[in-house]
Amino acid sequence: MKLTSLVVTIAPLLALTQAVKVNPLPAPRSIDWLDENPISVNLDKLNLEIGAENSIISEAFYRTVSTLRKLKWYPAATEAPISSFVPFPTAEAAVDAKKKKRDSQRTFDLSGLSVVEVTVNDYAADLQMGVNETYTLSVSPSSIIIESETVWGVLHAFTTLQQLIIYDNSKFVIEGSVNIWDAPLYQHRGVMVDTGRNYLSIDSILDQIDMMALSKLNSLHIHLDDAQSWPLLLNSYPEMIMDAYSEREIYTIQDLQHIIKYAKNRGVRVIPEIDLPGHARAGWRQINPDLVACGDSWWSNDVWASHTAVEPPPGQLDIMNDEVYEVIADVYNELSEIFTDNVFHVGADEIQTGCYNMSTLIQNWFKEDPSRSWNDLSQYYVDKAYPIFMNKTNRRLMMWEDILLTPEGAHTLPTDVILQSWNNDLVNIQNLTSRGYDVIVSSSSHFYLDCGFGGWVSNDPRYIDDYSNDVFNTGLGGSWCAPYKTWQRIYDYDFTANLTDAQAEHVIGAEVALWSEQVDSTVLTQKIWPRAAALAESTWSGNRNSEGYLRTNELTQRILNFREYLVALGFGASPLVPKYCLLNPHACDLYQNQTVLEQYGTHNDKNSTIAVLN
Ligand SMILES: *[C@@H]1O[C@H](CO)[C@@H](O)[C@H](O)[C@H]1NC(C)=O
Ligand SMILES: *[C@@H]1O[C@H](CO)[C@@H](O)[C@H](O)[C@H]1NC(C)=O
Ligand SMILES: *[C@@H]1O[C@H](CO)[C@@H](O)[C@H](O)[C@H]1NC(C)=O
Ligand SMILES: *[C@@H]1O[C@H](CO)[C@@H](O)[C@H](O)[C@H]1NC(C)=O
Ligand SMILES: *[C@@H]1O[C@H](CO)[C@@H](O)[C@H](O)[C@H]1NC(C)=O
Ligand SMILES: *[C@@H]1O[C@H](CO)[C@@H](O)[C@H](O)[C@H]1NC(C)=O
Ligand SMILES: *[C@@H]1O[C@H](CO)[C@@H](O)[C@H](O)[C@H]1NC(C)=O
């Protein structure tokens, strides 16, 4: 009796919404299911039909097919896009609906589709910032057709196709005819990892690239070194490697080339960062100790007024030492040969004046002309270093916003430098874009993945269990950017809110960032995934539905399933919920009301939304 009555209530719901099980992440910009007649795919015979031989495409195709075969993936409970006009089914009903659908008799074409037809307009377009990633994917009972401007769009089409093909009733099927048009909202969609604070194994980095490719993130920014360690074995200064953590915790040129090629084959750019002139001690001091100011000082949290660093150990390249620029040029030129991306990140964050107080050269420079300021010193560095960095074809530089937005920042900076924003949220984004800079958003308030794990400096009395420490221990707890950023917080960040259209056009992308003071290869994946998938979707197709409302609740089942998918592939992505919530869509919502997010406005409301760029 109970089952019958459920069927009655569910039937109209299924008719109203397109009840497909797959829910690819990121959600495509446009996906049209034309029917619900499963189309069988013959994976054993699946062939690529393409105009010209292209090894990147054929290898990606092979990977897609072999992954499908290995995984035999069937998604856990999913749902169609939420319609605000339809009441949500209860958890029990949703599960029953799924069972009912699976049990309904279907007939399959036993032969199945065995060709994927691919058309590419421009095979030559290199994987560089702004390359066209648009693709269309059409599946009908007679064909699977992919069209793309470039090779890189085809790779995205494959990761979509890989998520569309499921293993149901002992067959590989696509759940119906479907037309997809897809293209990213933002050209730069990234993850930043840090191999300076702790070493990350090459395998663990390749894993990140796999997961990025699957979620259509296209930029891996590697903060290669920091004051703590220098893991790069270079020809120009092999002695720098004396400051690697061990002989094993290094990257040779071949290692770096391997990472870059692996990433390129998956449509992921690798952007190197050498942090200059701050955060610099390890490596440089091996060439000549005089290159580094304050490297042997006590970083001094004891007397904060005279601190030389924001975290131990201290060290900054001495801006007034001419040899510094020769060494920077050599290291930069060698790395520019290795890294194929047009974008190179040269750091420029967190210059500490207390450190330069320990440089005789800099103090003398100030004495020569008492009118000189810290801003003049930063300007001196920019004016000397910028021509060295720009002495390359097609070069775009990236720097942290500090170079302009801190009290000791430079007066001016050429506007072709891309600035990565990590402080003050929308205020800094608006400041920089209004001045004509292209901005990549990594606001620490939303996109820093290392926040909320407590502090790491030792000999810290603030953890003593004493009432005087209660605020600390119930507050930030030593993590300066606490709390932990949940996937919902990441997804909901409208980082172009309140910008004019002209300003919004200067926001060219976003990165989640994972600083590695408390991270090495053992926890890398769990700290990045699946949270980075929330950014992957907000930068690919946005965080809003077609009516302009936040679609965070719609992402729920997508990201829960995506996490299961990563785990099935062998990646240790963190669980986000009790599995009950995955299996019972929306049973774990805070509100049963499925439209509560609508009170936060639509994309027409400039005060609260992400700009739609197309
Ligand atoms: C990418 O190529 C398509 C098809 O040629 C074109 O319509 C679209 O405008 C291009 N997109 C970008 C961002 O260049
Ligand atoms: C740096 O030196 C100047 C001049 O000697 C002094 O006024 C300032 O307090 C010092 N700053 C720090 C952070 O030690
Ligand atoms: C730029 O590179 C060329 C060729 O490598 C070199 O001759 C020149 O000195 C460089 N200029 C600067 C400013 O580094
Ligand atoms: C940007 O920020 C700087 C530093 O805080 C400030 O001096 C400047 O006036 C701001 N400019 C704009 C356009 O907001
Ligand atoms: C659900 O939430 C929306 C937005 O806050 C509100 O307008 C609507 O009245 C709520 N619906 C119910 C049934 O409470
Ligand atoms: C956006 O904010 C401005 C300034 O506070 C306000 O005048 C305007 O009414 C707001 N727009 C909407 C749609 O809420
Ligand atoms: C946009 O600007 C208005 C007016 O300054 C402000 O009230 C509102 O909070 C801003 N919106 C966001 C999301 O910062």
Image (cartoon, rainbow, N blue to C red):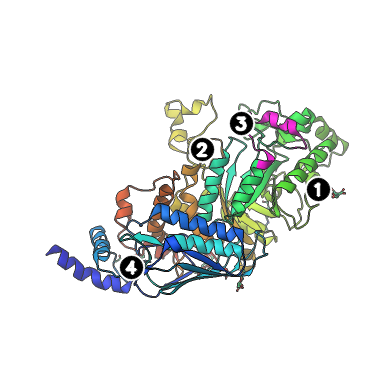
Badge 4 vs badge 2, beta-carbon distance below 8 Å: no
Residue corresponding to mark 1: 388
Mark 1–mark 2 Cα distance, whole angstroms, equals 36 Å
Q: Are marks 3 and 2 in contact (CB under 8 Å)?
A: no
Q: Residues within 10 Å of mark 1 (few under 14, many from 20)?
A: some
The quadrant the N terminus occupies is bottom left
The quarter holding residue 188 reads bottom right
Magenta span dominant secondary structure: loop
Quadrant in which the C terminus appears:
bottom right
Q: Give amino acid for label 2.
A: Ser
Residue highlighted by disc 3: 248
Position of residue 126 measured from the top left corner of the image (x, y, whole percent):
67, 61
In the image, which residues are magenta? 235-254
Specify the farthest residue to the left: 1
Q: What residue type is labelled 3?
A: Arg
> Of the numbered discs in the image, which one, if any, rests on residue 479?
2
Q: Return the x and y of residue 154 as percentages of the image width and height.
A: 56, 64
Indicate whether residue 242 is drawn in magenta: yes
> What amino acid is found at the position of numbered circle 1 in the picture?
Ile
